[in-house]
Image (cartoon, rainbow, N blue to C red):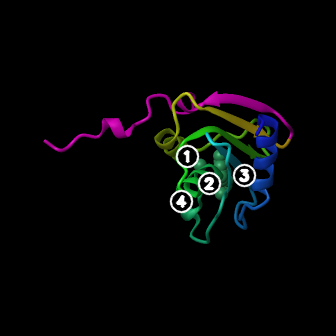
Amino acid sequence: MTVDQMIKEAIEARKKAYTPYSKFKVGAALRTINGQVFHGCNIENAAYSMANCAERTALFSALAHGENVFDLLVVVADTDRPVSPCGACRQVISELCDPEMPVILTNIAGDRLETTVAELLPGAFLASDLKEER
Ligand SMILES: O=c1ccn([C@H]2C[C@H](O)[C@@H](CO)O2)c(=O)[nH]1
Ligand SMILES: [Zn+2]
């Protein structure tokens, strides 16, 4: 699937957002190396802090379906600039995606920012930093 098609998928995913509180809808499309595409949307809760962002929803959905090798993530929202993933999502993306993987941030107006996982969170804390207690 092409980048343009992936952006359309993210826009489709955004329509499924559950945002009664913020009314701010975000969509994500995550492509596996086999070409499968997983949708993510933000899902809020009356206990506000339980909200799950679109990016994490897409990643968690893919892993729950047994897929864990990705080559592209697209995120879209109706923002003035290409939507900027929150810190929590940057950490989760860093854990589950290759540092060189491209990430396309976009908005409904069509502005696009192409970045990478490593650029989103330089110096991310990684599994490789964990050590047994000594
Ligand atoms: O990149 C982002 C930024 C925000 N949100 C969600 C979380 C919350 O539901 C709403 C407002 O922060 O937008 C995302 O899903 N992704
Ligand atoms: Zn987030």
Q: Tell me if mark 3 has few (under 14), some (14-19) or many (20+) residues whose alpha carbon lies within 10 angstroms of its own.
A: many
Q: Which mark is residue 53?
A: 2
Q: Tell me if mark 4 has few (under 14), some (14-19) or many (20+) residues whose alpha carbon lies within 10 angstroms of its own.
A: few
Counting residues from the start of the chain, the first of labels 1 and 4 encountered is 4
| Residue assigned mark 4 | 64
Q: Disc 3 versus disc 2: distance between alpha carbons?
A: 8 Å
User: Quarter-wise, where is residue 50 in the image?
Assistant: bottom right
Q: Disc 2 versus disc 1: distance between alpha carbons?
A: 7 Å
Which residue type carries mark 1?
Answer: Cys
**Quick check: marks 4 and 2 in contact, CB under 8 Å?**
no
**Quick check: marks 4 and 3 in contact, CB under 8 Å?**
no
Which residue type carries mark 3?
Answer: Val
Pointer 2 residue Cβ closer than 8 Å to ligand 2: yes
**Quick check: marks 2 and 1 in contact, CB under 8 Å?**
yes
Q: Is residue 21 above or below residue 104?
A: below
| Residue assigned mark 1 | 89
Q: Residue at x 61, y 39 (%)?
A: 33
Pointer 1 residue Cβ closer than 8 Å to ligand 2: yes
Q: Disc 1 versus disc 4: distance between alpha carbons?
A: 17 Å
Q: How many marks do you count on the picture?
A: 4
Counting residues from the start of the chain, the first of labels 3 and 1 encountered is 3
| Residue assigned mark 3 | 26
